[in-house]
Amino acid sequence: MTKFKQKLPILSPLFIALVVLHSLFVDYTVQFPDFVTNENSESSIETMKPQVITENGVIGRISYLESFLVELESKELPIDTEMEETKDSVKRVLIGQKLLLGLLIFYLFLTFSTAVTYSLRAWFHKSMAHVLYPVSLIVLLPKIFFQLNLMVQKDTLSYFYFVFLVLTYITMIISYRTIIKDKEPFEGFQSLQFSSSLEEEGRSPSNTKTGTYLAPVFHILVIILIGILIGNLVYIPLFLLQKHYVSEFSYFIFFLIGLLSVFYIFNYKKVGGESKNANWQNLAVSFAYLQYRFLRNGFLSIFSTILIILFVTFLFSLLLFNIDVIQNNLGLFGKTTEF
């Protein structure tokens, strides 16, 4: 039984991944009645109940919105038709759905990374688990209630999916408790903690001795020249590209991010790969570590932003309080002064 519980943290992310894959193609929503009636008959009461309906997932919605947008921009429509507001609204919804698709794909990769880091005992596994399992416990709960409502509506497939979701939920709870209570140290791939060090990347520290006084001036001139070249040859063309070719520029940016991610994955493999593991295992952990860095930097950015907002709000409130005290007690600003 103990060995089986130790295998659950590898299996439960796979179950979560199946739920995420299902969400890409199938989604559920609550449909409320279009009208309210005063009749007390059984049929009218039944029609007044909210119904859970099955609809296309995020991929289907994106496909539908894109085809709908193409129809709106078609030349077959009347020239005098006012469609700009509708187009803008559809584009905003489409952007939101694409962002949701990106989050779901990232979530899907997170399940893979959590399973891999646990099986290979990577040192950052618990950090990944502390993100995956609490989020999954929250995400799966509404899905279970949707299936309960579909079971009441006599949907046959909902019985099977409900059992699968409940088993996944129980498996997640047991897996998370197993990970938390596991006192054995996760010491695999320790060298990845020093991946930003020059020594770990095989480079020796540069000589820090100062030269002549002309060297800093020369460096500043070189930096200015490089900045001018980058601004004229890179930034301005990119600005014009994203202004006139929004979709193409978005694909180009994602391609560059993917290319940079591949570079980091192979760099992490070179720095932190262990000889006792197979090549694909080192690559998998390197990919998981890249996702760990994304999560860590993302949380730090959000936390820093919240702190800055709170600090600025506190300073502004303190300023208003001081002005109010001075105005009421000392009268320096006069009675008619308002801030």
Image (cartoon, helix red, strand yellow):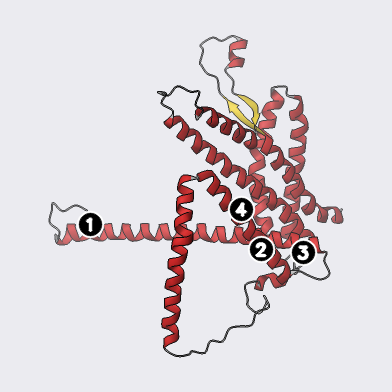
Q: Quick check: 107 left or right of 74? A: right
In the picture of the structure, the residue carrying the numbered disc 3 is 282
Q: Nearer the viewer, residue 232 or 87?
A: 232
What distance separates the C-alpha of mark 1 from that of mark 3?
Answer: 62 Å
Circle nearer the viewer, 2 or 3 = 2
Circle nearer the viewer, 2 or 1 = 2
Cβ atoms under marks 2 and 3 closer than 8 Å: no
Answer with mark 3 or mark 4, whichever residue precedes in sequence. Answer: 4
In the drawing, what numbered circle is on residue 324?
A: 1
Cβ atoms under marks 3 and 4 closer than 8 Å: no
Q: Quick check: 221 left or right of 158? A: left
In the picture of the structure, the residue carrying the numbered disc 4 is 255
Q: Quick check: 331 left or right of 85? A: left
Cβ atoms under marks 2 and 4 closer than 8 Å: no
**Residue at 73% in and 62% down:** 285
Answer with mark 2 or mark 3, whichever residue precedes in sequence. Answer: 2
Question: Label 3 neighbourhood size at 10 Å, few (<14), some (14-19), many (20+)?
Answer: many
Q: Nearer the viewer, residue 205 or 136?
A: 205
Answer with mark 1 or mark 3, whichever residue precedes in sequence. Answer: 3
